[in-house]
Image (tube, rainbow, N blue to C red):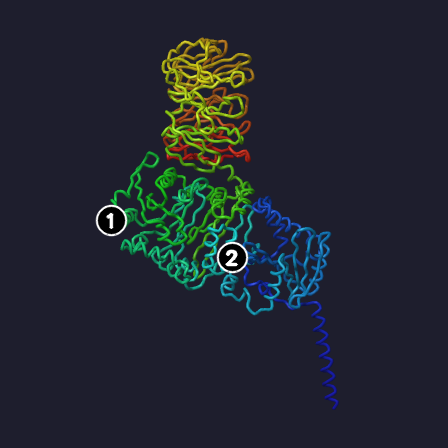
Amino acid sequence: MIRKVLFWTVAAILTGILVYAFFELRRGNIQKVDIIQAVPTDAAILVITHDLTGFIREEMSRNKIWQELGDMNKIGEFQKTLNVLDSLILDDKEIAALYKGKDVSFSIHKSGRNGFDYILYYQMENKGNDKQILSFIQDKLPDGSTLSNRRYNEIRVYDADFPGKKKGFSFTFSHGLFLLSRSSILLEEAIRQIETNHGVADEPGFREVARTAGRNVEGNIFLDYKTIPGIVSGLFNDRYSGWVEDFVHFANWSEMDVNIRPDAVLLNGFTYSGTGMEDFLSIILKHQPQRLDIEAVIPENMVGFFALGLDDFPKFKRDYVEHLEIHGSGRTYLRELKTLNEKYKIDVDKIFLPLMDRQVALVLTDVRNFDWDENAYVVCNTKSRSLAEEKLLEFLGIIAEKEGVALSSLIVSRPVNNDVNYTFYQIPVPFLPGKLFGKMFSGINSKYCAFYENYMIFGNSIPALSKYIHANQLGNSLSSDLDFAQFSEYLASRSNLYFYLNIPASGKLLERFLKKDLFEKYEEQKDQFSKFQAFAYQITSENDMAYNNIILKYSPDMRDEAQTVWESRLENPVLTKPRLVTNHYTGEKEIFVQDEGNNIYLLNNSGRILWKQKIDGLIMGDVYQVDYYKNGKLQLMFNTREQLHVMDRNGNYIERYPVTLRSPATNGMALFDYEKNRNYRIAVAGEDRGIYLYDKSGSLVKGWNITKTEGRVKMALKHFRVGTMDYIVFADHFTTYILNRRGESRVKASKHFPVAKNANIVLESNTTGIKPRLALTDSLGRVHFIYFDGTVETVDLGIFGGGHYFEYSDLDGSGRREYIFVDGGELKVFSHDGSRKISRSFKSDITSAPVIYQFSYGNKKIGLVSGERSELYLVNNDGSLYKGFPLLGSTPFSIGVINKTTSKFNLIVGSDENFLYNYSVQ
């Protein structure tokens, strides 16, 4: 009996202790679940940060990309929110202690048709944390806010509403987690998810990639390829949103470790896909990574490229077809391929795919102006160029016979850049690259192809292919680009899939793909985007998973490099220097140019041709704008050999024009407006050695008294005013003429000399300690200064050829002018004391006079053109080439600001391939 009493007494005491301990412990600790268990299964992106406040304060504050994004509206607002959150947390020591070194996670979900929203997760240490956080939120809510609470699935949910129209947020405490979202519906999904038995962590793909996640990194990002296309497709317009949604069949899950550098954001990690052909990535994993040396034939002015690296193209195609059949998503594609093969009784895959060697790429060059096809190429590396050409001819022969056309009609031989002849093959089968390599290449019609080295290049036209080949002839490829080489240091040397986007040059590409309102937001922030060098995504097969590299690189110096803004195609090769003229209605600049067919064009500053008109011959000399009617409206004035022309901005002649010249011209007209009252005088030299002065109506001016010159005058006349005196100056082969406004001799030089063939007369009138004088060179390159009292002073800086060019300008803002000579392929610059400052050689002769461009005080550059090589040079005042040069172009060029909304300079130049180029220069 005593034993029983003792037993039950001890048992009661022990039970009491256990019950007491249980309830006491429950007061301080809580039943926890892992954050992953609360993430709704429709999450597209899951971000885990291991120290949120440290990440914001230390990593993001020194990252230049993060700083630049702060200038963009929506991202800037998000940054401010994070910074405020960081400051608030640090102000509260208890809250700061809760968050320090702890994981804070975000999941992103599709919301509505095209939107998305997020949930924030924080795992609390004990039950008292919820009171601390609740008190913290109540204390920090702005004035006028309300905080209400309600029950959902037996869990208390708090809803914070802000004054006005500002969107509030909801939060709750459940199973040791603090959850917060702007969407109360999304928050309720997370509450329900905690109670379920199946979550994200139970998905095989997630488990596989989660095992590879790094811990000693700034964070981890998980991507679900089955749901993320639903969010991303909302960024694209209707034409391409469905195409993006097809990416649900790309892979399963990815995990990316986040590494923040001062000038880059790096994401690295693994992607999992199934073992069958359900996911496209499973096809890629069956191939060894390849060294993609296709960069050697991708022009450096490209916008982007997408490349595949494969060790067996026929196997890839068989697996790809099986992949399409599984999903039933390629019925049209497979039907067209079958129709092609049956119509011509061929197997197009067997003809071409065995010839392919390791790599194929879709390349987009500068698509800023004209249509997609003219700037989109498919580039394939072949095992043997000769065998590939043989098989191509065999293929074309079968088609020609079936269609009843001559094979020769499908083959064109044409020189590229007036140099080596290339053979261009017309491809009568629409969208052949897509039929060979898959739907990702199906948007390229590629009506022609050509070969460059061992590469087979598909393009939409012969001019497009010529431009592509010419870029390679000049050596302007990615592999020779230093910026790209530095960027590539972040990437693996071998890969199976490689996507690259040149962000500053991608405006027109984004306009093609993005929703209109989203692209407009991009346009508003274009200056910020121009500081991002590039984005790249690289996939490399590694055992049964794919290793990923994603890089976003910041490089503010990219804006200093000349970049193509647009390219406009004319009917013929460009013949003359493009002139920048003013639209008198808008104040914007427009471009006036002539081609080899004697067509003249006016283009707006976006490169669109406003009008085209054929005239009687080559424009000689400059093109002027005049206010003929003195009403603020401007006309274009210029001369050909036979006529004076005056046109309005619509390309219509004004009354009396064109006017036939009294004698065919030997020079470009000169325009004088002595009193700035728009009573213009037009001076033209004739083949009869007469100098004719016309008024603006085209009539000869009475009282002009010059007799005929000793030789024909080829230089344009110039008018200078020194003090109160007017001087009209020019020269023939031996005599320099200095006249007054009546054509009478005003100054006679004390010495005569043979004038250089390309003589340029320069006035020096404002140099301290030097009297006003004219500078020009003789046939040997000696510089002669003619003072206005007739005195001649000679400076000998060496012997130069008879065809040299001369300029005399203060390049560095020192107050003293430099002597600038271009002779053949040599540029030489001498200081005022005769010492040599610059000596630079070029690979071929410079074919037009040097032009001095002033970017700012003391910052002048020398513009040069090699017509033979179709190259432009911009030489700094220290003799170095300006970054980004040489550029492609064959005519003299103009530099100026053509858009009033920006301070950037534009370089406009013509080419012998029918293109007018607009480069951005800063």
Total numbered labels placed on residues in the image: 2
Q: Is residue 563 left or right of residue 146?
A: left
Q: CA distance from mark 2 to mark 1?
A: 49 Å
Q: What's the residue at 75%, 89% (across, down)? A: 2
Q: Position of residue 734 (x, y in %)?
A: 39, 13
Mark linked to residue 401 = 1
Circle 2 sits in a helix, a strand or a loop, which is it? Answer: helix
Is residue 774 or residue 375 the one in the foreground? 375
Q: Is residue 219 left or right of residue 795?
A: right
Q: Is residue 656 left or right of residue 132?
A: left
Q: Is residue 781 above or below residue 458?
A: above
Q: Is residue 480 left or right of residue 150?
A: left
Circle 1 sits in a helix, a strand or a loop, which is it? Answer: helix
- The residue that disc 2 covers is 228
Q: Amino acid at mark 2?
A: Ile
The quarter of the displayed image where residue 153 is located = bottom right
* Mark 1 crowd level (few <14, some 14–19, many ≥20, 10 Å Cα): few
Q: What's the residue at 54%, 47% (across, down)? A: 518
